[in-house]
Image (cartoon, rainbow, N blue to C red):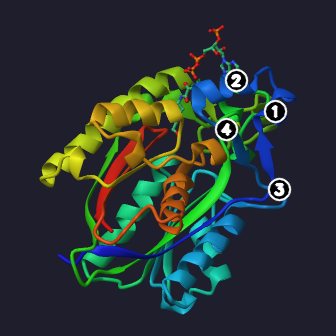
Amino acid sequence: MTRARITGVGAYAPKRILTNADLEKMVETNDAWIVQRTGIRERRIADENEATSDLAVRAAQQALERANLLPEDVEFIAVGTTSPDMIFPTTGNIVQHRLGCRRAGSVDMLAACAGSIYSLSIGAQFIQTGKYKRVLCIGAETLSKITDFTDRGTCVLLADAAGAAVLEPSEDERGIIDFDLYSDGQYWELLYMPGGGSRHPATRETVDARMHFAKMKGNEVFKVAVRLFVDCAERILARNGFTADDVNLFIPHQANLRIIEAAAKRVNLPMDRVFVNVDRYGNTGAASVYVALEEAVTGGRLKRGDLVLIVAFGGGFAWGAALMRW
Ligand code: UT7
């Protein structure tokens, strides 16, 4: 089967920086706690008039330019997001129109932070089957719009950004070797947004009860996250005949530095082969892995032939891994 290869990456984060010192003025927290428990020092927050598609379009334009493609070359757009512009139309539709991708079908993948790995994997399928030759995968979030800035358990973590990757058929061994997608709905109440859907349609009462904000039992998420991270990383490596020693760069979902360090240790990967930018961006949901990949590429952390392991995890729970030859 033809491998899907990433031929261009892009990223965009809003200009506005929210530091831990800023958060100290908003909720009862402090810089030392946030840094020690999460590794986050600052994050980017969208303006009032900036929506998820605005970030997605900028990241996608950069990825297309770097892949030397025109918008009309794109045949399919897969957007991972849990903070879409609206429930419908999809953010994919809005991005398709604004980019001018006249031939492209589009879809949104709502898989919380795992929207990154879901959008990348589903985009890759179209290349692998030979159906399409140019697919645009995007992870984009304005999580600040669904964050309760009176809840210190979430507002210190969640943030805004977008990243994109262009997939094309590979002519050699480079490209996505394998991926795995998983879900387990038994954990849904550990991380969710209760209001605004068909279970609790928006009413004055749901808004007064702050049900249109993300709710999280962080500590419980943490424990399951580390176990699932490790399980799926080990499984995809073993199935493809690799060990941690073969991995040149591990790009984990940037949820929390402690989760990343705990998972890397158990998988036996030293931190110098683990990409981390959670300190500067916080947890940007479906965008995080794409933004990290873009920084790894532009920062010279990847060379041709490197083995790259990506693992993402989020509410639902939904999680997964991708293994690729760069
Ligand atoms: O994207 C994927 C999904 N999300 C995640 O992966 C997030 C996973 N979870 C986490 O990152 C961590 O659980 C948190 C950063 C959310 C919390 O860290 P923790 O080490 O699990 O802290 P905790 O919830 O056990 O709370 C410890 C203490 C508590 O005080 P007491 O009860 O010990 O007095 C909390 O009330 O820290 C307190 N606390 C805070 N203190 C200062 C909780 N949040 C804060 C805060 N600032 N922002």
Asked if disc 1 and disc 2 are in contact, CB closer than 8 Å, the reply is no
- In this figure, which residue is indicated by the disc labeled 4? 195
- In this figure, which residue is indicated by the disc labeled 1? 21
Name the mark nearer the viewer: 1 or 4. Answer: 1
Q: Determine which of the numbered discs, if any, sits on residue 32 in the image.
A: 2
**Which of disc 2 and disc 1 is earlier in sequence?**
1
Residues 186 and 34: in front is 34
Mark 4: give few (<14), some (14-19) or many (20+) Cα within 10 Å: many
* Res 245 seen here: yes
- In this figure, which residue is indicated by the disc labeled 3? 47
Q: Position of residue 88 (x, y in %)?
A: 63, 62
Q: Tell me which amino acid carries mark 3.
A: Asp
Label 3 to label 1: alpha-carbon separation: 19 Å
In the image, residue 259 sits, relative to residue 96, either above or below, namely above
Label 2 to label 4: alpha-carbon separation: 33 Å
**Which of disc 1 and disc 3 is earlier in sequence?**
1
Q: Position of residue 291 (x, y in %)?
A: 55, 59
Label 2 to label 3: alpha-carbon separation: 27 Å
**Which of disc 4 and disc 2 is earlier in sequence?**
2
Q: Residue pushed farthest right?
A: 25
Name the mark nearer the viewer: 4 or 3. Answer: 3
In the image, residue 279 sits, relative to residue 169, either above or below, namely above
* Res 153 seen here: no
Label 1 to label 4: alpha-carbon separation: 30 Å
